[in-house]
Image: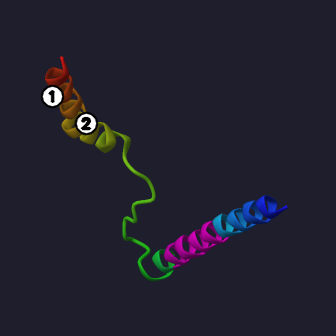
Amino acid sequence: MNILIVFVKVLMCISVILFLGVLFFSYLKYLKRTYFPKWKFPDYFSVGYAEYLYKKYIEEFVKKSAKKFW
C-alpha cells in the first residue's frame, strides 16, 4: 500500500509542475499579446537551425569519436 501512495504522490507532483508550466507560459503569451503585439516571440524551434546545429556539433563529434575508437 505504501508503494501506491508514493506513486500517487509522484504523479501529483508531476501534474502540479506541468500545470504551473502551463500557467507560466500562458501568462507570457498574454504579456506578449497585450504589450508587445509586433514582437516576434519564438514559439517554436526552427527545423533548419536544428539541422545546422546537429551538423556543426553532433555530427563532427560522432565522426571524431568514431575515428578514435576504430
Residue 30, horizontal then vertical, whole percent: 54, 77
The residue carrying pointer 2 sits among few (fewer than 14), some (14 to 19) or many (20 or more) residues within 10 Å by Cα, namely few
Residue under the image location 54 percent in, 75 percent down? 24
Q: Residue furthest toward the bottom?
A: 35
Q: Which mark is residue 64?
A: 1
Question: Which of the 4 image quarters holds residue 2?
Answer: bottom right
Residue under the image location 50 percent in, 81 percent down? 34
Dominant SS of magenta comes to helix
- Mark with earlier residue (1, 2): 2
Residue 14, horizontal then vertical, whole percent: 64, 64
23 within the magenta span: yes
Q: Quadrant of the C terminus?
A: top left
Residue range highlighted in magenta: 16-30
Q: Is residue 59 above or below residue 15?
A: above
* Depth check, front residue: 49 or 30: 49
CB-based contact (under 8 Å), mark 1 and mark 2:
no
Q: Which mark is residue 18?
A: none
Label 2 belongs to which residue?
A: 58
Residue under the image location 19 percent in, 37 percent down? 56
